Image (tube, helix red, strand yellow):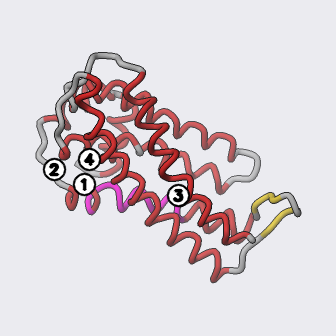
Amino acid sequence: MTVADRAKRILFKPEEEWRVIEGESADLKTLYSEYLCILALIPAVGTFVCSTFIGVEMPSGLVQLSVGAGVLCAIYTYFMVLAVVYIAALVTDWLAPRFGGEKNIDNALKLSVYCNTPYCLAAVFSMIPGLNILSIIGLYGLYLFYVGAPILMKSAPRSVLYPATVFVIVFIVALPLGAIQAMFWL
């Protein structure tokens, strides 16, 4: 299955696709090399285009990075996406028993990788002035987690607390990573 096919199916037929994904064997290397490393290019390119050509609004005004600094920022964004998705998988696996689920790191990785599809695709909007607010579409990943966790992690069906708890913990852990990235604009 191509990246585009998987992305389309996870976005538009999530419950059906989670059942397909559940039956697939996948490890970190496979999930990253065949899916996430490709999708993570979108936020990286978006960061480069936005920071270098469009600019970022700061309290001091609009700031544009040099091409070199933009490339470094894009590389940082790329690896930050890969790291945060892995952290999310660890948190998902760790929390599973607390929400009636089963620990299974492979399924937690699948859940984390595929739930980040909307975030990566929505990064396209960061490259279009005036439409960057549409990046909020990336939050659809929370719904994907909500639907997928009972299937992959065997958690309590339709538990809003599980995806919310994972999101909050990962957000808190990722905040310092974002702060490091913000230093590119200082």
Of the numbered discs 2 and 3, the one sitting upstream in the chain is 2
Q: Residues within 10 Å of mark 3 (few under 14, many from 20)?
A: many
- Residue 34 included in the magenta stretch of the image: yes
* Residue type pointed to by label 3: Pro
Which residue is rendered at x = 35% and y = 62% of the image? 37
Residue ID at (56%, 51%): 123
Residue 29: image quadrant is bottom left
Q: Is residue 9 above or below residue 171?
A: above
Q: Residues within 10 Å of mark 2 (few under 14, many from 20)?
A: some
Return the disc, 1 or 3, that comes first in the chain's sequence: 1
What is the spatial separation of the Cα atoms under label 1 and label 3, in whole angstroms?
18 Å
Is 24 inside the magenta-drawn segment?
no
Whether tag 2 and tag 4 are in contact, CB under 8 A, the answer is yes
Choose mark 2 or mark 4, whichever is in front: 4
Reading the image, the residue beneath label 3 is 43
Sequence-wise first label, 4 or 3:
3
Query: Which is in the foreground here, disc 4 or disc 3?
Result: 4
Mark 1 vs 4: CB contact within 8 A: yes
Q: Are marks 2 and 1 in contact (CB under 8 Å)?
A: yes
For disc 1, the marked residue is 31
> Given the current orientation, which residue lies at the most extreme right position?
60
Give the quadrant of residue 110. Answer: top left
Quarter location, residue 47 = bottom right
Q: Which mark is residue 26?
A: 2
| Element class at badge 4 | helix
| Helix, strand or loop under label 2 | loop
> For the point 39% across and 59% down, which residue is it?
83
Disc 4 marks a residue whose amino acid type is Leu
Structural distance between the alpha carbons of marks 2 and 4: 9 Å
**Marking on residue 109:** 4
